[in-house]
Amino acid sequence: MTCVYDTADGTLIQPLKGHKDTVYCVAYAKDGKRFASGSADKSIIIWTSKLEGILKYTHNDSIQCVAYNPVTHQLASCSSGDFGLWSPEQKSVSKHKVSSKITCCGWTNDGQYLALGMMSGVVSIRNKNGEEKVKIERPGGSSSPIWSIAWNPSKDEHHDILAVADWGQRLSFYQLSGKQIGKDRQLNFDPCCVSYFSKGEYIVMGGSDKQASLYTKDGVRLGTIGEQNSWVWTCRVKPDSNYVVVGCQDGTIAFFQLIFSTVHGLYKDRYAYRDSMTDVIVQHLITEQKVRIKCRELVKKIAIYRSRLAIQLPEKILIYELYSDDSSDMHYRVKEKICRRFECNLLVVCSQHIILCQEKRLQCLSFTSVKEKEWIMESLIRYIKVIGGPPGREGLLVGLKNGAILKIFVDNPFPITLLKQNTSVRCLDMSTSRSKLAVVDEHNTCLVYDIHTKELLFQEPNANSVAWNTQCEDMLCFSGSGYLNIKASNFPVHQQKLQGFVVGYNGSKIFCLHVYSMAAVEVPQSAPMYQYLERRMFKEAYQIACLGVTDSDWRDLATEALEGLDFDTAKKAFIRVRDLRYLELINSIEERKKRGESNSELFLADVYAYQGKFHEAAKLYKRSGHDNRALTMYTDLRMFEYAKDFLASADPKDTKLLMKKQADWAKNSKEPRAAADMYLTAGENMKAIEIIGEHGWVDMLIDLARKLDKAEREPLARCAEFFKKLDHHGYAAETYSKMGDLKALLQLHIEARHWDEAFSLVEKHPQFKDDVYVPYAQWLAENDRFEEAQKAFHKAGRQAEAVKVLEQLTHNAVVESRFNDASYYYWMLSMQCLDIARGVCMLKKFHSFQHLAELYHVYHSIHRYMVEPFSSNMPETLFNLSRFLFHNLTKDIPLGISKVYTLYALAKQSKALGAYKVARHAFEKLQGLKIPARFQESMELSCLTVRSKPYHDSEELIPMCFRCSTNNPLLNNQGNVCVNCRQPFIFSASSYEVLPLVQFYLEEGITDEEAVSLIDLEVPRADRKTARWQEMSSGVCCFTHCFFYTSKMICHRIKKKVPKTYLKVYNISKEVE
């Protein structure tokens, strides 16, 4: 028979007689609309919530257990030999054979898998279709049959966790994959039932120990729920509640409600509380940091004080300490262990002691478990709290049931009675100065006493807890009847809604315990602050505001204090709201007070003016004899009508000042013409000129400039600046001429690029020559007239700029491949250096630029030959040019000159003229360079063909030294000099052939003029057979019996730049001509 009971009072609602034999199991569906029963008669009956049977099916053996899918109405029914799966959508039950008797079953939370516990000690996990997915084989096998299983319903777990209890007296936990979690828990009894309590936080278990016990979800035993007279065969938890029902072998059904007491401790902003019965969480109420301490045993009591934390476990007390003295440190470590069992109602920890409270007895123990003090009270202890003190000498505040309130020091055996009242103490707290005591009695009345006089200061009803503000002596709060009450001094109580118990009050934060959670509630202290402000107690109001008020409250406090002339408080309050305007006002008033001012009405008038109370401020200004301040205030505010009414006298100065102010207002009001007229009337010419010039009123500006006296230089100069800005240079020139400022006039012509006017002015005033020619040269250079710019720089005496212009010209010419122009510019540079030469450095530059000019002149022909399809130069000329250039590229290669072009031209012309050795050498050099793609093929072909030619050069091309008559190779490692006598070759400027010219030095005593006259003489005729060179022992070359086919001799000397003895004589042959 199946019996249905009412859980409210245990009455039998109705017996259901659908089975013919003993009913072994029942199970409700998740929604409670159906339940199923299984019997020894091998049948399953499905019932509705109205206790009507709607379906019956059978197995081949007696039914051992049934379980509903938590998601659907699918039912699993298990017998000794098989299990069946049925759902309303199916027409028949699908049955699956098993190898052992099934003793228990259970679905996962998502309803996807079914776990079967068997007599063989195996747990089989099947899917919804009955297919086995995981098989868990227990070590004990058939000697440890599985008797109960349960899946953890918690949604916070990352995996599905299965609790398994077997008759090997073990409790184990597994994941869905079959992996065991942790080690087996030894039970010391045969478990018959396992069920998760609440939302998976705890486990309820019963069995052969004849009691239902509570365990953590990890299998740690916490305590006994209820003891019975026989085995507990089943236990079930009511969904989403704290009720547990237990079924026993003798037919007893017991119904329990589990209520967990709050185990916690608080000290200032640290709150410690029990979590999951075996853990302790320490929470910092300000920073919201939390730290969890795992004890793995039932936590019975918690106490916290400063850096100490005491935790009482069933068989010991653990003392923890912080790692450091940092107020935000949350790392605790074990300091001491007291391995003794204690029975106490309250536990308190101090710096060096723990205090145990049991009924009327207080015991003080050291951390080494030595009892140092003991106090016996006259009544039951209802409340105890540590109120601070030196380490080892802390004070305790104790409240008794008979109304006595005591103060006990841990190092003093004698308690001190603070006061005694007629009602029992429920809650206590002492103010920070230890001068006031707040008590909540058994009638929920909050009473506040003066400790020294024992006088009752005030009392308030509807209180269940009380706390003094640790930062303000005169503030406390108490809670009760769903309200939070805040009382400051002897002002009325301010109320607001708040659920829970007040356990602490620090600044603007109230620590409130509601059910099992502690929260720090931020409470603005606005109400008590305004209570102080109403009595003009500004300093006290500021202290309250510091605890925590809104920005608008701070502003109200600052304004009230400022109007009350409490500048110190007002300054602090305005700093809080960062109002710089009022802070500047306060600072100015303080400076004036330091200088000896003491007129309060004047200070208050300034305050009213800042607050916008202008008429009140004007009255106070007038009363204090400062009419000018009122006038300034009105004009600054553009209240000109009020200002005129306020002016009692017709003083012209005041009228002029008012007009200036009105002009300023017109300017700011975007009425510039009216403002300019007002400024002119008031004599403020500069301000008027600024407005006229900014708006471009040229006619008005020239009229004003012509009216101004020439002595008024500043206004005239400003007018001229605006004329320049507005591109009216004629008016500007007229103004500067009126002023007589020639330099400014000249600068005007230069900026306007009126060079003719500038030069005509320079002719009259030569001292301004440099001021004109330098910008003129710069302008020419900017307009690409570089040669003119260079001449202008010369005229201005700026030789460095002139050289710089030429250098830029040469660089541009090289970059743009205008090598002929580059040669010309380098020649000009050399001449420039020669003109300004003052030492050896400039002479070196002269020779360097001459050399570069010659190189670029030669390379111009090479470059044209390489890039243009046709060349006007003969092959011999190109050969001489490329050979000359190659000899000069042995070291640094000037910018723009291509060694590839030079070698390629040399190679081609050498091959064409029969200088095959030179050609092969040039091609070999080219192979080490990067060749342009357009020359690659022809170069390779020429390189191959030249190898078929004889390895020597044509004798007609071999150059001869006209000094020593030595034949020189075409490619000379020493450059363009004779390999024998080192005489430099002189080349023709057109064909670059070696000219028959010889350099010689004069003997001492022969002047330059004598040398020239000797050269101009006719060469004496001599017999050719006897003609020869004679070399004097002195090393001087003479012309004895020499005959030359010479028609003219030319002598060239660089005057004053080189020694007179250094002459070059050029012999130009008729044949060359």
Image: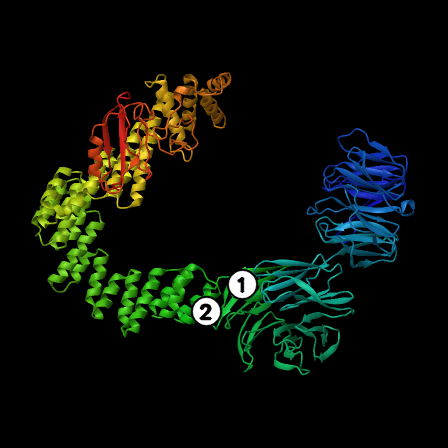
Where is residue 684 drawn, in percent x and y? 14, 54
Where is residue 746 drawn, in percent x and y? 15, 44
What residue type is disc 1 on? Lys
- Residue toward you, 147 or 439: 147
Quarter of the rendering occupied by the C terminus: top left
Earlier-in-chain disc, 2 versus 1: 1
Task: Tell me if residue 166 comes above or below residue 521 in the rendering.
Answer: above
Judging from the image, what secondary structure is the residue with disc 2 in? Answer: helix
- Residue toward you, 825 or 736: 825
- Residue toward you, 1017 or 480: 1017
Say which residue appears at 43% left-offset and 68% top-offset: 542
Judging from the image, what secondary structure is the residue with disc 1 in? Answer: strand
Where is residue 178 drawn, in percent x and y? 79, 42
- Left or right, residue 376 beside residue 819: right
Mark 2–mark 1 contact, CB under 8 Å? no
Residue pointed to by mark 2: 543
Dot 1 crowding, Cα within 10 Å, few <14, some 14–19, many 20+ = many
Residue pointed to by mark 1: 509
Where is residue 454 drawn, in percent x and y? 56, 81
CA distance separating discs 2 and 1 = 15 Å
Task: Tell me if residue 193 comes above or below residue 898 in the rendering.
Answer: below
Say which residue appears at 46% left-offset and 62% top-offset: 549
- Residue toward you, 727 or 1028: 1028
- Left or right, residue 162 beside residue 908: right
From this viewpoint, is residue 255 visible? yes
From this viewpoint, is residue 700 visible? no
> Colour scheme in the image?
rainbow
What residue type is disc 2 on? Gln
Dot 2 crowding, Cα within 10 Å, few <14, some 14–19, many 20+ = some
